[in-house]
Amino acid sequence: LSSGTSALADKGLLEAPCSQYPRYSSIIDVFSQQVAAQPDRIAIKDSLCQWTYARLDLESDKMARFLRDLDLPKETVITVFAERSCETIAAFLGILKANMAYLPLDIKFPAARIESILSFIEGNRLVLVGSGCQFPIMHMDRVDIVPMVRLSTGVSLNSAYNEGTLPSPNSLA
């Protein structure tokens, strides 16, 4: 173990740089500062793409705008069923920007586990589904499924989504 530790030390991986943030800063505050300071710097990479801070900010703003337009109460739980990707991080940030809470659902969970988790959420449930993910068929009422790719590409949700009912301010209230 000591040889492994010394190898990590040689690479400078044992000492994480300490950054000072204002005590009451949120993740969104710190993210916004980074966007302003370095908009063209790579913020995130996945196996298919990489996004700058400016692009991540733009995509997360689209998500936040969509969620705000639903007129949901603050801190509404929004579930995210997606693989680890740039799109997923944009969803998490957008949910936070909209003053809501995110609940990630592992795509490897069996349908019964997902159904159990969703059953603990009061009221209607909104599930954002990542690109390339197939949300399992559920036998639950009040579950609205929205593919994130529709939000990212700017395709009109009302005309393009035909797999189910889109949430409206009234359906989620």
Image (spheres, grey):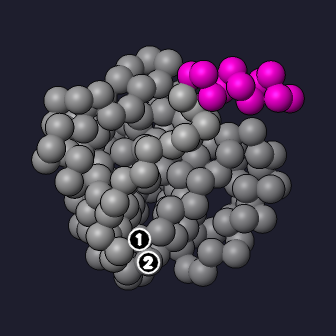
Q: Is residue 68 above or below residue 18?
A: below
Magenta residues, start to end: 1-11
Query: Which amino acid does the dot numbered 2 rest on?
Result: Glu
Q: Is residue 6 visible?
A: yes
Task: Give the distance between the C-alpha atoms of the residues marked 2 and 1, in whole angstroms.
Answer: 4 Å
**Residue at the spot 57% in from the left edge and 61% down from the top edge:** 103
Where does the image place residue 126, in percent across and percent down from the top left? 50, 62
What secondary structure prevails in the magenta region?
helix
Q: Secondary structure at mark 2?
A: loop
Q: 14 or 85, which is in the foreground?
A: 14
The residue beneath circle 2 is: 75
Query: Which amino acid does the dot numbered 1 rest on?
Result: Met
Q: Secondary structure at mark 1?
A: loop
- The quadrant of the picture occupied by the N terminus is top right
Using the rendered view, name the quadrant where residue 170 is placed.
bottom left
Where does the image place residue 136, in percent across and percent down from the top left? 69, 44
**Residue at the spot 35% in from the left edge and 23% down from the top edge:** 50
Q: 75 or 41, which is in the foreground?
A: 41
Examine the structure image and report whether residue 6 is included in the region drawn in magenta: yes
The residue beneath circle 1 is: 100
Q: Are marks 2 and 1 in contact (CB under 8 Å)?
A: yes
Using the rendered view, name the quadrant where residue 89 is placed.
top left
Label 1 crowding class (10 Å Cα cut-off): few <14, some 14-19, many 20+?
Answer: many
Using the rendered view, name the quadrant where residue 97 is placed.
bottom left
